[in-house]
Each structure stands twice: as structure tokens, then as C-alpha cells.
Amino acid sequence: MSETKTITWRLHLASSPQRAYDMLATDAGRAQFWAEEAVEKDGQITWRFPNGWEMSTRVLASEPPHHFSVKYIGGSTTTFELQPDGKGGTDLTLTDAGVQAEHHMETYAGWLSVLLALKAAVDFGVDMRNHDPERTWDQGYVEN
């Protein structure tokens, strides 16, 4: 069995836990910052990314507005914990457990890209992605 690692990132959002949760846990929300499409049906999310890559993942837990978890790329378990900050905002903790060691650095960087795109979308209504299939993560572009 190959070695796995856990990635943890924290992010503060000015938006409420419910608004952040809706971005993570709904088709319309995910399409605003994460993937070109991410449609959920019967607990399965089908993702389509700008580079043409498609995949299917399984929702493990959905507890609005504080917890959302999916079985993600390579079988890792990705969990978003959303806690109110006491001032109307949200402290988000992302944990991605079971990341294959050989993909750790790319996954670590990838989550940073996703989280900053989430912050731009949820707090400012800005889509930072370029939506250009010629300029994707595969070519070294971070904004997709």
C-alpha cells in the first residue's frame, strides 16, 4: 500500500457559513469558483474542468451550514468545516485525508487555488478563473 498524507488549509471568509456552504455544496455554487460544471445527482457529483477532465465523486456528508465532505480525487476524503467567526464571517478548515504521497505537492497547491477562488467568489462575487481550455492547470496556469 502506498503512503498517504493529509493536507490542511484554513481560510477566513467575510461571508456567513451558510453562504460559504452554499458555494461548496450546490451545483450553482461550485460552478462559480471550482469547476466548469459540478452537478450532483443521488449523492454523486460529476465534475467537468476546463482541461476537459471529467470525474465523479461521492458526497460523504452534508450538514448545512457547517460540514461538507466528499470522496475526492484518488480516493482521498475532503472535508470542509465552516464555523462562524462571531462577527458575521466564517472560519473554514479544509482537510484532505488520504492523498497519495506522490501527488501531495500538486494537491496541496491545487487546494490553495480552489480556496482563493472560493474567497473571491463568496466574498466579492468575482470569478478568478480564465475558463480557457488552452490555459489550464496542465499548462501551469493557476486560475482555472
Image (cartoon, rainbow, N blue to C red):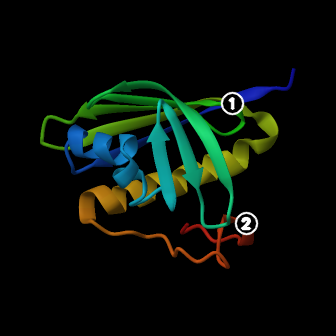
Q: Position of residue 32 (x, y in %)?
A: 38, 60
Q: Residue at x 76, y 34 (%)?
A: 100
Secondary element at tag 1: helix
Q: Amino acid at mark 1?
A: Gly
Q: Position of residue 92 (x, y in %)?
A: 36, 38
Q: Image height check: is 16 above or below 86?
A: below
Instruction: Between residue 127 and residue 116, name the one nearer to us.
Output: 127
* Disc 2 element: helix
Q: Quadrant of the N terminus?
A: top right
Q: In the displayed structure, does residue 70 sit left or right of residue 84?
A: right
Label 2: few (<14), some or many (≥20) within 10 Å? Answer: few
- The quarter of the picture where the C terminus appears is bottom right
141 or 64, which lies in front? Answer: 64
Residue drawn at (63%, 71%), measured in percent from left and top? 141
Residue that appears at 81% across and 26% down:
3
Q: What residue is shown with label 2?
A: 138
| Left or right: 86 as drawn, with respect to 19 | left
Cα separation, mark 1 vs mark 2, equals 21 Å
Residue for badge 1: 75
